[in-house]
Every structure is written in C-alpha cells, then in structure tokens.
Amino acid sequence: MLTETLRVLLPAVITFAVGMAITPIISHYLYAYKAWKKRAGKQGLDGAEAREFNRLHAETEVRAPRMGGIVVWASVTLTILGIALAASLTESMLLQSLDYLSRSQTWIPLAALLVGAIAGLIDDILTIRPGGGGLPLSVRLSVVVVLATIVGWWFFSKLDVHTIAVPFWSPLDLGILIIPFFVLFSLALYASGVIDGIDGLSGGVFLSVFAGYTVIAFTQGQIGLAAFSASVVGGLLAFVWFNIPPARFYMSDTGTMALTLSLATIVFMTDSLGEGIGIAAFPLIGAMLVVTVASNVIQVVWKKLFKRKLFRVAPLHHHFEALGWPGYKVVMRYWVLSIVCTILGVIFALSASA
C-alpha cells in the first residue's frame, strides 16, 4: 500500500508525464489547422478599442495557436480516468491505492473542469474562424451561472454545506444563500481568467494556487481532493514547459474556464466541508487572481467617476507592460509574488483551522 503522501504526489508526476507526451500531438494539430486568431485586436471593458493593449500585443495575438489549455485538462482527465479504469480491471493493490476518482471528493471538481473545458473550447473554435468573435459574453456567463448553480445546489442539498468558515470565529450560516454565494464566487474566479495575457503568466499563477490547495486538502485528510489538485499541478507544469516565452500556444478559454470553475469547487470543498477555511484563505492564495479582477473593476469605476483611466491598460499586468517592463519580467515577478502569497495563505489556513 502507498502512503497518503505518495497517493497525492504520484498522480502529479503521472499527469506531468502524460501532458509532456500528448503536447507534441496537440501542438501538431493546432498548427496544422491554424488554430490562432486571424485578426488581432481587442475591445476594452467599455466596448471601445483597447488601443494600448493592441499596441502591445498586435503581433503576438496572432503569432501562436489558442487552445493550449487542452494540455492541462486532457492530461488530468486521462490520468484520473486511466488510473480508475486500470484499477477496476485488475486486482493490483498499487492501482487500487492510486485510484482517487470518488463521488465524495473528485466528481464535482472533475465535472466542473470538463464542462468549463468544453464551453471554452467552443468559444475558441468560434474565435479562430475568419472574422470570428467567439461565444458572446452573455453565453459564457450563462454557462458559468448554470454550472455554479448546479454545483451550489449539490453542496447545499446533497453535502449539507450551508456555512462559511470564519477564521478564529464561529462559522457564518448562509442557509440556502450558499448557492448564490457560490455562483458569485465562480463568476469572480471566471473573470480572473483574463490573466492569460502574457506568455507563461497564467500557467505559473494557477500552478501555485492549485499547489496551495493541494497542501490544504492533504492536511485536512481530503486525500482524493488533494490528489486531484496535485494532478492539475502536474498538467500545468507540462503546459508551462511549452508556454514559457516564446509560447508555443496560449491557454485561452478552454483552459481558463476549466481551471477557474474547477478551482471554485476545490476552494469550497476545503472550507466547512473539510473543516477548514478554504474560502477565507483564497484572497491570499489567489492574490494575483484577485488583483487581476480588482484592477479591471477599479479601471471601469475610475473611468465612470473621473472620465479618465487610472491604469494605462487593465488588467494590471498589461499596465506594467505599458510602462515598459518586458513581458518576461512581469511574468517572473507575478510567479514570485504568487508563490509567496500561496505560502502565506497556506500558513494562514493551517493556523486558523488548527
């Protein structure tokens, strides 16, 4: 029998190996079918042309294919289902102990991962068509709302989750309001997907966030959930290997939707359900995602109030580019800050739930 530590770490290694193996195949087809935007340019949050962003990224937007996020969710899915299938067909104790597919801990985050992946993939396919603009934002938001409502209802009705852990205090009982709270949390996390804007940035930040929740789930005895989170880390490591500048492909919506929706379920499952403070710890662990969303919101509000922009371009990582920072410097500093914030968040989570 494997120790619990190996049950968590081995899936990460296997997923990384699977990701490295399938990436050349995925990359081949992405280039063969010219899966990149045919026309550069984006609109700002107010619908006007994002001139500063387009100045910075007019060439890079059409340089590499989209849909690189397939590497992450495909490697995770192949690993978790492959191990489960092999365990069901054999009597190997090793495979039995490695099998972390379970109704109680991994069905929900895996379902969220795959639904987000499919919705994002459809958006990417529509985007790469000549003149294509992808799925309307209203449709993408509707997917998030519907999925989050179903998952929120599952938490409330099937798992009896109706409270949010408050550090060093009594839990906050939301009752059925836990469902809309989860929907709002999922929407906010989905909005953080815009961090996929510079080569290597999104992969490195998501990597540290999922690693943080791997540690939290493990210390709370949620071994299956920890193994799933670690598996996502393995898939992200394979993705980042090919996404460092110059990126072979971009993560795009099929990756960011899959990761943010899956992450939302993991955050909630490491809260009162796991007798932890997964939600309260998120502002620290996911600090760079929070900053990304906050900078967009602040930019919109600032323009409404003062009729001018606070940042040269939002979200914040593009503001630093506009100031003259090379993309790789922004990425590396975001990685460092994300790792530090994750460590602080994990320390906070472990201290508050001790």
Image (cartoon, helix red, strand yellow):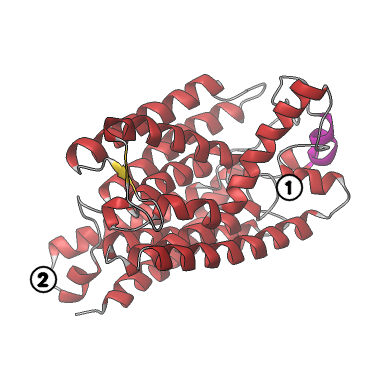
* Residue 56 highlighted magenta (yes or no): yes
**Which residue is labeled 2 in the image?**
91
Identify the residue at horizontal 82%, vertical 48% (top origin). 321
- Residue 10 placement (x, y as % from top left): 35, 72
- Residue 222 placement (x, y as % from top left): 28, 62
* Residue 284 highlighted magenta (yes or no): no
Chain part drawn in magenta: 51-59
What distance separates the C-alpha of mark 2 from that of mark 1? 51 Å
Q: Secondary structure at mark 1?
A: helix
Q: Quadrant of residue 64?
A: top right
Left or right: where 230 falls relative to 4: right
Viewer-closest of 122 and 35: 122
**Which residue is labeled 1 in the image?**
317
Q: Is residue 300 visible?
A: yes
- Residue 115 placement (x, y as % from top left): 38, 37
- Label whose residue precedes the other's in the sequence (2 or 1): 2
Left or right: where 157 falls relative to 113: left
Viewer-closest of 231 and 164: 164
Identify the residue at horizontal 78%, vertical 60% (top origin). 329
Mark 2 belongs to which amino acid?
A: Glu
Q: Quadrant of residue 158?
A: top left
